[in-house]
Image (spheres, rainbow, N blue to C red):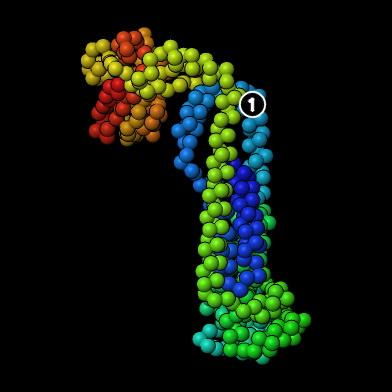
Amino acid sequence: MSFFLYLTQASLYAFVMWGIYLLIGYNKPHHRLSRAYLLAATLLPTILPFIRIPVERQSTNVVQQLVLPSINIGATHTANMVAGFSWWTVLICSYFTISALLALVYIGSYFQINRRLKKGQQQRLAGYTVFTETRIGPGTIGKKIFFPSEEIDETILQHELAHIQSGHRYDSFFLQIIQVLFWISPAHWLLGRELKTVHEFEADQIASQNADLSEYATLLLSHTFGTKHSFHITHSFFHHPLKRRIMMLQKIRKPQKRNLVMSAFVLTAIFVSTVLLAQTKKTTETQTAAAPQNDSLAQLDAIAQRMNAIPKPGEVQFMADGSIVFKTAEKMPHFDGDFSSWLKDNMRYPEAAKARGEHGKGLIQFTVGADGSIINPHVEKSSGYTALDEETLRVVRKMPNWRPGILKGRAIPVICLLPFNFTPDGKVAANEGC
C-alpha cells in the first residue's frame, strides 16, 4: 500500500468517526463515554486501512497469479519509475521531517514548562506536588499542578486533581503521538481538540460536585480574562471553550437506562462504520486487482490457450518469458545414472573458500525441459558465499540431459531444486531435488 494512500484513507476514516461523534455525542453529558469514543475514533482510522476481509480472496489471487508474468518493463518505464521513486522519497522525507519538528516542539514545551516550574515555589498538597508563582496556569502537566501566583483556589485545585486522578495525561500523551505521526490529517486535530475539551467537562463535573454550580460558573468567568500563558501540552483551567463548559454544568444527566441506550447506540455506530469502511476498502482492492486483467487481455488470452492445450493435473508456474513449467508430474524427471557419483566426480570445494573457512547450505533451482535439457539454473537460496554458490551453479550447468517429467503420457518441463551443503570439515553434499 502506498504511504500517502494510507494517510488519505486514515484521514477520511477519521472524518467519518468525527461526523458520527457530532451526530450522537457532541455536547452530551456522558463525558466518560465521549472520552472513550474519541480515543477509539483517533486510533481506529490508523488501523482500518490494514483490515483485510477474507472474501473473494481466491478470485483475487487468481488474477494476480496470471497477470504478474505478463508485465514487461522497458528502459523508458524503468527510467520513469526511478524518477518517480526520487520524488516520492523527497515527499516522504519531507513528511517525516515535519513530524520530527512537531515532536521537537512538544519536547521543547515540556522543558520550557519544567524550567518555569523550577522558578516557582513548591509544596505538597493532597499527596501531589503543587507549584505556585510560576506565572503560567493554573493547570497540570503529568502529576504536577501549577498556579500563576501564590494564591491557591481550592475549587481550581480540585479541578486539577480531577485531571490527574482521571488519567487525562495518558490521553494527552497518546494524542501527541498521533498528531506527530498524522499531522496532515485535519480530523485527528479536531478529535484531539474535542478530547481535551471533554477532559475539561469531566474535571468540571468532578470539581463542582461539592460546589454551587452558579458559583463555579462565576469562578470561570471571573478568572477568564486574567489567565496567564498556557501551553498546548498542559491541561489549563481556562484554556477551553468557556460557553460550552458553563452549558455542560447546567445539564442534568438522565437516568442510567438512558446512558445504556446511548452506549449501545455509540458502540453500534462504531461497529457499523468499521464494517462499512472495511467493505469499501475490500471492493476497492478487488477492482484494483482486476484492472491489470483488462490491460493485459491479449497476454492472458494467449496464456489461456496454452493452458487449454496442456493437461492441468500438475501444479504449474508461469515464467517471465511466458512459458509454463510444472512443479509436479505423474512421473518426475530424474538423472540418467547415479546422480551422487556424478556429483562426487564433478563438484569441488573451492580451495580459496576452504582456506577462508567459508561453509554453508544453499539451494539451486533449475528446470528440466521437455527434452531433458537443463534450463535457467540459478541460486534460489544463497549459502552466503559467492564462491560456493558459483561452484554449485557451474556443476549444474554442465549436467547432462535428464529424463524429462511425464504427465498424461507427454513430456513436460518441471522445476527442480538442488540442495547443497559445504560443511566445515571440507566435505560437499548435494541431493537430487526432483
Q: Residues within 10 Å of mark 1 (few under 14, many from 20)?
A: few
Q: Quadrant of the C terminus?
A: top left
Where 190 sits versus 28, above or below?
above
Q: Position of residue 67 (x, y in %)?
A: 52, 25
> What element does badge 1 sit on?
helix
Q: Amino acid at mark 1?
A: His
Residue sitting at 22 percent across and 17 percent down? 341
Who is closer to the viewer here, 326 or 103? Answer: 326
In the figure, residue 239 lies in which quadrant? bottom right
Where 170 sits versus 57, above or below?
below
Q: Position of residue 232 (x, y in %)?
A: 67, 69
Q: Position of residue 221 (x, y in %)?
A: 74, 83
Residue sitting at 38 percent across and 27 percent down? 389
Please give left or right for residue 268 compared with residue 109 in the image.
Answer: left
Who is closer to the viewer here, 154 or 97? Answer: 154
Residue sitting at 66 percent across and 91 percent down? 151
Who is closer to the viewer here, 78 or 382? Answer: 78
- The residue positioned farthest toward the right in the image shown: 225
Q: For mark 1, what is the residue?
A: 77
